[in-house]
Image (cartoon, rainbow, N blue to C red):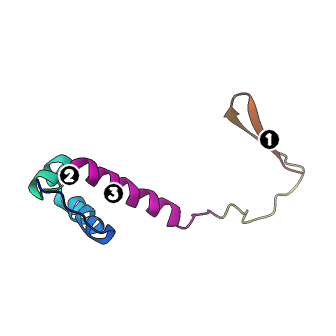
Amino acid sequence: MARSHRSAAQWQHFVELWRASGQSAAQFCKTHDLGYVSFCKWRQQFETDQRHTSPTQFIDLSTLTQPTGSARWTIVLSLGNGVELKLNQL
């Protein structure tokens, strides 16, 4: 395989073709005469970029009705290493 320098746009195109191909990454690289290690590096880069540019999704947890009476609740989240986050209704 001759060494070839490809642009990021070209690698992005190959990654998109691979996703649609149904082939393993290794088989796709053989079929398209691509370096497997280079392909994996670029694929990981695009996945990392996508994770950092995707908007954070938040879910609205506000209550639909106001609680009545003296109902109280406590939520304890155990985060590991002895760290706990406690939430109490006032």
- In the figure, residue 5 lies in which quadrant? bottom left
| Residue at the farthest bottom position | 9
Residue type at mark 2 is Gly
- Is 55 included in the stretch rendered in magenta? yes
Q: Position of residue 89 (x, y in %)?
A: 85, 50
**Pointers 3 and 2 in contact (CB under 8 A)?**
no
Real-space CA distance between mark 1 and mark 2, rounded to the nearest whole angstrom: 51 Å
Q: Position of residue 28 (x, y in %)?
A: 15, 54
State the residue position of label 3.
42
User: What residue appears at the point 61 percent right and 63 percent down from the top-left corner?
Assistant: 58
State the residue position of label 2.
35
Which mark identifies residue 86? 1
74 relative to 58 in the view: left or right: right
First reached walking from the N terminus: tag 3 or tag 2: 2
Residue type at mark 3 is Trp
Q: Position of residue 62 (x, y in %)?
A: 72, 63
Residue sitting nearer the eye, 29 or 63 = 29
Part of the protein shown in magenta: 35-59
- Is 70 included in the stretch rendered in magenta? no
Looking at the rendered structure, the secondary structure element under dot 1 is strand
| Residue at the farthest top position | 82
Looking at the rendered structure, the secondary structure element under dot 2 is loop
Residue type at mark 1 is Lys
Compared to residue 40, the image places residue 9 above or below, namely below
